Image (cartoon, rainbow, N blue to C red):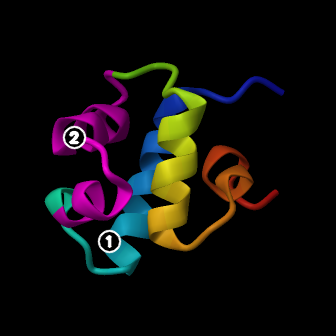
């Protein structure tokens, strides 16, 4: 099954909001630009780099696979 990056963006947005974090707060925790988070959540970045996914997942306290596959 092919996953679209919009789904990753949707998951990222949901997980970030569940933790009551702004994009800027998550960006600071993950060490990425807040614009990167905005672009992933909006689907403007189609294929986030693995290191970005890994850093975001670590900042959210989840396994990167959960961000990519949604815990499936």
- On screen, residue 28 versus residue 63, left or right, reads left
Q: Earlier in the sequence, mark 2 or mark 1?
A: 1
The total of numbered circles placed on residues is 2
Find residue 17 and name its label. 1
Asked if residue 11 shows in the view, the reply is: no
Which residue is drawn at the image coordinates 38% and 22% (left, top)? Answer: 45
Going 68% across and 29% down the picture, which residue do you hit? 3
Q: Is residue 49 visible?
A: yes
The percent position of residue 70, horizontal first and vertical second, equals 68, 55
The image's mark for residue 33 is: 2
- Decide: is 5 above or below 16: above
Quadrant where the N terminus is found in the figure = top right
Foreground residue among 34 and 4 = 34
Q: Nearer the viewer, residue 68 or 58?
A: 58
Main SS, magenta residues: helix
Residue drawn at point x = 73 percent, y = 51 percent: 65
Marks 2, 1: nearer the viewer: 2
Q: Position of residue 50 (x, y in %)?
A: 59, 33
- 36, 72: nearer the viewer: 36
- Region rendered in magenta: 25-44
In percent of width and height, residue 52 lies at 47, 39
SS at mark 1 in the image: helix
């Amino acid at each position: 099954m092919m996953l679209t990056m919009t789904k990753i963006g949707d998951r990222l947005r949901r997980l970030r909001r569940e933790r009551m974090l702004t994009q800027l707060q998550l960006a600071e925790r993950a060490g990425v630009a807040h614009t990167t988070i905005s672009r992933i959540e909006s689907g403007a970045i189609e294929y986030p780099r693995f290191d970005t996914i890994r850093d975001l997942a670590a900042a959210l306290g989840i396994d990167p696979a959960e961000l990519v596959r949604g815990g499936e």
